[in-house]
Image: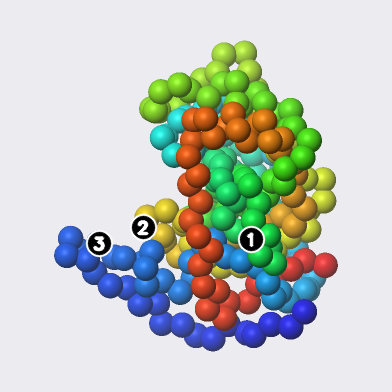
Amino acid sequence: MHFIHALPLTILVTMSSSGIANTCDTGHLQSPINITTTHKQKLPNLVFDYKSSSLVLANDGHTLRIRINSRSQLKVGKQIYTLSQIHFHTPAGDQVAGEVFPMGAHFLHKSTSGQLLVLVVLFRQGEPNKTFNTLLSNIPKRVGPNQDIPNTSIDIQTLMPTEKSYFRYMGSLTAFPCTEGVEWIILREPITVSIEQLSTYKNTFSDNARAPQSINQRPILESI
């Protein structure tokens, strides 16, 4: 597929009356996006060193957060990122050729230099996910800080597809203050979640996805 190279962009930042930069409204590298046109090329393999972790969950009122307390890492080329947490969005936010996925998992990473990377796993409706059942049965009933779930661990790899081909683009945080300069990697192959699991999740959490944002001539890379 063909694409237009990204042009130099002046990131416009306006100040509200409170003095807070409103990048969510004026930024040019915002997430999520609808991936339509990509540039296919040889990209670095994703090398996962995700370890099982004791289960620590938080209900923040908007989503279920999994706090990762094992030293789980992702290597992209020569850069190593450490996984800190996983949380969920319904619907996924990022779309592929206009397809809306009912759920997405965001794996939040940071390098030693402070570079943020979000890896996204997309969900399609289908067979239930066994690990997601464990999460659903342990959602904290009250909004609050992290809670250790006794005698329970999580194998992070079971929340990922077997195939690790991906899309990559430069984006932002999806919630205020929508900070830009965040690396986004979206695994191309979705995993499945059942309609019953989605229904159970939505009994606690309302839809929380941000609408797709303008691409603004950003190059969207696709691994081959």
Secondary element at image label 2:
loop
Task: State the image coordinates of residue 215 (x, y, percent, origin top left).
Answer: 55, 74
- Identify the image quadrant of residue 132: top right
Name the quadrant of the C terminus. bottom right
- Label 2 crowd (10 A; few <14 / some 14-19 / many >=20): some
Disc 3 designates what residue?
20
Task: State the image coordinates of residue 27 (x, y, percent, origin top left).
Answer: 41, 71
Secondary element at image label 3:
loop
The mark found on residue 177 in the picture is 2
- Circle nearer the viewer, 1 or 3: 1
Q: Amino acid at mark 3?
A: Ile
Task: State the image coordinates of residue 195 (x, y, percent, origin top left).
Answer: 68, 36
Secondary element at image label 1:
strand
Residue drawn at 74 percent across, 49 percent down: 190
Disc 1 designates what residue?
95
Circles 1, 3 touching at the beta carbon (< 8 Å): no
Q: Amino acid at mark 1?
A: Gln
C-alpha separation, residue under disc 1 versus residue under disc 2? 22 Å
Residue drawn at 45 percent across, 27 percent down: 146
Instruction: Determine whether 206 is above or below 110 in the image.
Output: above
Q: Residue furthest top?
A: 151
Q: Amino acid at mark 2?
A: Pro
Circles 3, 2 touching at the beta carbon (< 8 Å): yes
